[in-house]
Amino acid sequence: MTDALKRLSEEGVAIWLDDLSRKRITSGNLAELIDQQHVVGVTTNPSIFQKAISSGDGYEQQLADLAARKVTVDEAIRMITTADVRDAADILRPVFDATQGQDGRVSIEVDPRLAHNTGATIAEAKQLAWLVDRPNTLIKIPATKAGLPAITEVIGRGISVNVTLIFSLERYREVMDAYLAGLEKAKAAGLDLSKIHSVASFFVSRVDTEIDKRLDALGTPEAKAARGKAALANARLAYQAYEEVFSSDRWAALDKAQANKQRPLWASTGVKDPAYKDTLYVDDLVAPNTVNTMPEATLQATEDHGDITGNTIAGTYEQSRAELDAVEKLGISYDDVVQLLEDEGVEKFAASWNDLLKSTEAELKRLAPSEG
């Protein structure tokens, strides 16, 4: 065993777990990961909840109570998921207090079916913040075109946000702009900016999966040489954009008002291609003031054989730009790839949510008390 997770934390990378279930909460596993493996946050998404609730482990009593009350399936899912997030937030509260609110956070996502509806996303974010009712919650809003004004409005109301499903550098800049606009709105309303936090979830492995597939279809030596480089290059250039925005004059005015920087969060860090080292998207994305949210398998792999050698982003920008340019020169459109990944990301989460609706509805029917 190495102490790679400790070194990662010392380099300024907050380790968050990309998973949550009631069993993880009630068994003491989450508390153990916080205590022993430097985990300081939790992220959830519709796919994670679909897997957890469909397993049935620990949810039977609450489902039976909900069935007895004859609640709708949508309300049942909200009650179940917010209960898990609330309990996880309570377990992480000491971390939240110790880090002055930077970590110790639990994320919960707005209904993914609302991803292209600004007004409904804002309303849902407000409702989720009210339902969970914990200061260490982050409301996840997807970085769709409709999501951008929702981010500004929700931040402007003092609700902390995890912006999710970011794939493109252009969209990431729009996300940071939406965050700053929200802070400016909150400042004008007299809110305490020091209490508002945000992370921007930049997805990593899916970029390699899609670009590698297109490179493999080309089959040339040049295409083969370009495999496995685009995702890291994309993420590193995102960090360059972060450094630029959060050293600007616009940011300086907010910084004086005690605002917090929106940290880049590396999401989708589980390696999909077995040809790559399973800690690739951890070892090679180390930089200060970032978050890496890992599936448990990636967390354990990093603990076991992660190779943390200090900052692996500084000094890479020129090479990263060249690597993305090399992919373009082979005829693979960056803009096409990132738009496809955003569309697929929204669709996958909506599909998981629909699966969750169906399985929960079946459970409510099964557990419904007989009339009479």
Image (cartoon, rainbow, N blue to C red):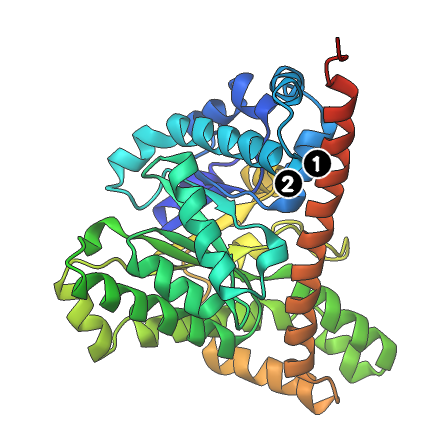
Q: Residue at x 73, y 84 (%)?
A: 332
Position of 152 compared to 339: left or right?
left
Q: SS for tag 1?
A: helix
Q: Nearer the viewer, residue 36 or 125?
A: 125
Residue 306 percent location from the top left of the image? 55, 45
The residue carrying mark 1 is 51
Q: Are marks 1 and 2 in contact (CB under 8 Å)?
A: yes
Residue 134 percent location from the top left of the image? 35, 35
Position of 159 compared to 55: left or right?
left
Q: Residue at x 71, y 60 (%)?
A: 347
Residue 219 in view here: no
Looking at the rendered image, the quarter that the N terminus falls into is top right
Residue 150 percent location from the top left of the image? 43, 64
Position of 355 compared to 18: left or right?
right
Looking at the rendered image, the quarter that the C terminus falls into is top right
Name the quadrant containing residue 19. top right
Q: Does residue 315 lie above or below 51 as drawn? A: below
Q: Nearer the viewer, residue 153 or 48?
A: 153
Q: SS for tag 2?
A: helix
Label 2: few (<14), some (14–19) or many (≥20) C-alpha neighbours in 10 Å = some
The residue carrying mark 2 is 48
Q: Does residue 95 lie above or below 178 as drawn? A: above
Label 1: few (<14), some (14–19) or many (≥20) C-alpha neighbours in 10 Å = some
Residue 278 in view here: yes
Q: Nearer the viewer, residue 37 or 198?
A: 198
Residue type, label 2: Ile
Q: Residue at x 45, y 53 (%)?
A: 123
Residue type, label 1: Lys
Looking at this view, name the residue that lies furthest to the top: 372
Q: What's the CA distance linking mark 1 and mark 2?
A: 5 Å
